[in-house]
Amino acid sequence: MKQTYSYPVQFIILMGLLGVFMIVGTLLLTLVGSQLLGCKILEVPAALNLPANAGLSKLLNLGATLIAFVVPAIIFTRIQKKDAQSTYSALGFATISDAKLLLYTLPITYGGILLSGSLAEINQHIYLPAALLEQAKALEQTYKTLMLNMARMDSVLDYISALFIMALAPAIFEEILFRSTVQPLFIGWTKNVWVGIIITSVFFSAIHFSFFGFLSRTALGILLGLLFYYSKNIWLSIFMHLLNNGLIVTQLYIVTKQGKSIEKAMDENIAVWWGIIGLVVLWFSFKAFKKHSPTLSNPL
């Protein structure tokens, strides 16, 4: 895609759009929530965290994420590429050239789960000064409270809706923003594929505001970034992201049906040595994946 503006200018434009639409999404969520719940604006966050309002909380957060992530990505791409058809293709939406790419995405996802799980365990032992540790724990608790509320699944219908709201929709929204939009910008700006993917992945992880999941999400972001870079097709990154999120939702649903603690299940990590197995799986899986991916002009 031909660049209309320099990369620093593109970065400023994209960050400005993200800032504006994050505010817009939050304001709309708050205003709509206030009207539907019949409470004051400042009371909306606490009201949405109540178990009785879990369904509404899911829908409103879904809408806010759509506005905050997808709208800026589309506007930014339209600025770079004017006509609608090229905007769609510029975001990486294309027919999957080889069905085997979908099959190879399965072991890549599995290897990624093993690696991210072991990194989550390592992340727990990273030293932080006491003041920063308390702030990190507070942010983690806020994030966990939101996730626990959204993860309430008392029936099969709740499970299906959770798969859509917590697995499919975030996979689409986040991949459109981070892999289709942010990643090409940083790769072009740094003129280095690895650096561009890593910066994007750090950004992707940081925006979740969860210190104790930072390394695991960064690793997931790198794998999603490599998948998109090798395939030039955002559907594959969405597919992997969906599988990852869907497995988490399914695990939480099973835990719920067994009457166990969801919070305890969310805190569980796997042994660090599983990460080594994950790396081996990823090495061979990506090697096979690249054989069926489009020709790369700047292979890693």
Image (tube, grey):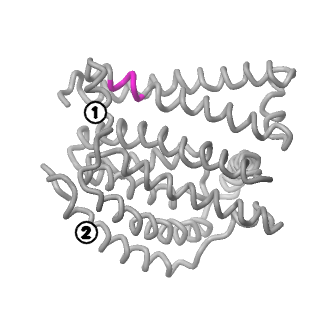
Element under label 1? helix
Q: For mark 2, give the secondary structure.
A: helix
Label 1, label 2: how far apart the Cα atoms are = 25 Å
At a point 54% along the width and 31% down the height, the residue shown is 66
Left or right: residue 111 compared with residue 62:
left
The residue depicted at 30 percent of the width and 26 percent of the height is: 87
- Residue at (64% x, 56% y) in the render: 249
Left or right side of 73 for 251: right
Please name whichever residue, 288 or 200, is drawn nearer the observer in this view of the structure: 288
Neighbour tally class for label 2: few under 14, some 14-19, many 20 plus, Cα within 10 Å: some
Q: Where does the image place residue 245, in percent across and percent down from the top left?
A: 56, 55
Residue beneath disc 1: 89
Q: Position of residue 138 (x, y in %)?
A: 73, 49
Image point 45% across, 23% down: which residue? 17
Callout 2 amino acid: Ala
Screen quadrant of the C terminus: bottom left
Q: Is residue 280 above or below residue 59?
A: below
What number is the disc on residue 288? 2
Measuring from the top left, give residue 175's x and y in whole percent.
43, 43
- Residue 114 percent across, percent down from the top left: 49, 71
Find the magenta span and give its range.
Answer: 73-77
In front of the other: 199 or 100: 100
> Is residue 220 or residue 237 the one in the foreground?
237
- What amino acid is labelled 1 in the image? Ser
Q: With respect to residue 188, does 7 lie above or below?
A: above
The quadrant holding residue 208 is top right
Instruction: Name the main secondary structure of what is drawn in magenta.
Output: helix
Residue 22 or 77: which is nearer the viewer?
77
